[in-house]
Amino acid sequence: MNDFDLELNRRLAQLKEQGLHRALRTFDSPQGARVEFQGRLLLNFSSNDYLGLANEPSLKVAAHEAVERFGTGAGASRLISGSLTPHSELEQLLAEFKGTEAALSFSTGYATALGTICALMDREDVIILDKLVHASIVDAARLSAAKLRVFAHNDMNDLANILKWADGGSRAPESSRRRSRVLIATESVFSMDGDHAPLRDLVELKEKHGAWLMVDEAHATGLYGPNRRGLAEALGVAQRIEIQMGTLGKALGVAGGYIAGSRALVDCLVNRARSFIFSTAPVPAAAAAASAGVRFAQSAEGEARRNVLWQRVGELSSSLDGASQDFQSAIIPWLIGEEEKAVQTAEALWQQGIYMPAIRFPTVARGRARLRLTVTAAHTRQDIARVADAVKRLGANLRPTSSQLPAHASAR
Ligand SMILES: *Cc1c(COP(=O)(O)O)cnc(C)c1O
């Protein structure tokens, strides 16, 4: 073995020692309540396909039609010749769906965060992140070279102190080409804890300090609010958030990310977001299917799916330990702590035909390993009963994580 591979094998061995090694598992079926693995059907509680759209006929038809009309590849980046009708239709639809002047789509949510934050912020600016915000936003903030501060999860006092510090600093010298800016970035429904950000308080605070706010609705788009726009809509603050981000690969069933906001924001991103400019446009089939996903989410059928989803979440909560449980989202963390133990617990469930993955560092902090259970509208009442029974037998302690907001029922 050469020196390169020897070194990498040493690193892999280290990961194994720490219970942090990961490997791919290949499933042989579409996403759904059940997935097939090596000839075996597993009850799937691992996916973000909240509305069960990833294998939905109307989305598949839209993808097929786009392939027929526009082919497989976009051929170039959006600013060269890759901007096709399905892309602009999707963006028009997203703007209408979100109730904003404009929207821009990206090939992934990760690319959305990276491109957007780096387009808006640089070394003269300050970015303030919630401690638990998604890796894409952390990486974006680092790449932007802005000064980085982190506030304790959902802790508005901590955030207020950092904002006061930022107000006091005269970071931009006289000669600077523009005023330095402060951006706060958070998620609305947190991806690994399932709790809510106190968006009303956040909006008040950022307005008081003249900061900008970016909210990632990856786990809320299609699920919350009268028009299913997200948690910001449910809480009545969407119009006061400068940068609304979301993904197209979770409840909307396809792939990609989006930014919804003002025309000026979108025009700036088209000119400055490097992950948008220097990347081949998403395949037309993805854009067309995502449009069908947005339409589905807005339809009566979408509302029916959402109702089923919350009904299943409620059933899980009551079968676990009665009325004291009240989950704020379809993401239910089972906190275990030790990495090795989380893996063993996931393995025990897998043996019983239930797939609920162990989530470990670096996705969550060290010593905060957990199993992450996600409920979808594709699950039946019996599926929920079965998983509740299995986790109870393994001695689970599934608790809604802390948040300053009332539980989901009032926010939806
Ligand atoms: C999944 C996710 C992303 C990344 O989106 P992809 O489309 O999967 O790249 C960004 N933010 C949050 C909160 C997410 O959960």
Image (spheres, rainbow, N blue to C red):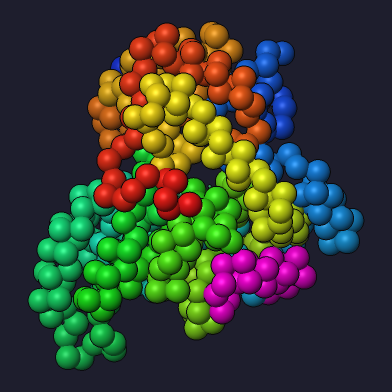
Q: Tell me which residue sits at (48%, 12%) in the image.
A: 390
Q: Position of residue 298 (x, y in %)?
A: 67, 58
Furthest residue in direction bottom, as rendered? 175
Q: Is residue 341 visible?
A: yes
In this orientation, which residue lies closer to the viewer: 321 or 403?
321
Q: Please tell me whether residue 213 is drawn above or below residue 320 in the rendered image.
A: below
Left or right relative to 378: residue 2: left
Residue 185 picture quarter: bottom left
Q: Which residues are magenta?
A: 80-102
> Does 27 lie within the magenta span?
no
Question: Which quadrant does the N terminus fall into?
Answer: top left
Q: Tell me which residue sits at (42%, 33%) in the image.
A: 332
Furthest residue in direction front, as rendered? 323
Q: Position of residue 128 (x, y in %)?
A: 25, 62
Left or right relative to 31: residue 148: left
Q: Tell me which residue sits at (60%, 43%) in the image.
A: 307
> Of helix, strand and loop, which mostly describes the magenta segment?
helix
> How many numbered marks have been drawn onto this rendered protein structure?
0
Q: Is residue 191 visible?
A: no
Residue 267 picture quarter: bottom right
Q: Please tell me whether residue 292 is drawn above or below residue 307 in the rendered image.
A: below
> Does 86 lie within the magenta span?
yes
Q: Position of residue 371 (x, y in %)?
A: 41, 25
Q: Position of residue 256 (x, y in %)?
A: 60, 54
Q: Tell me which residue sits at (66%, 39%) in the image.
A: 52
Furthest residue in direction right, as rendered? 68
Residue 281 picture quarter: bottom right
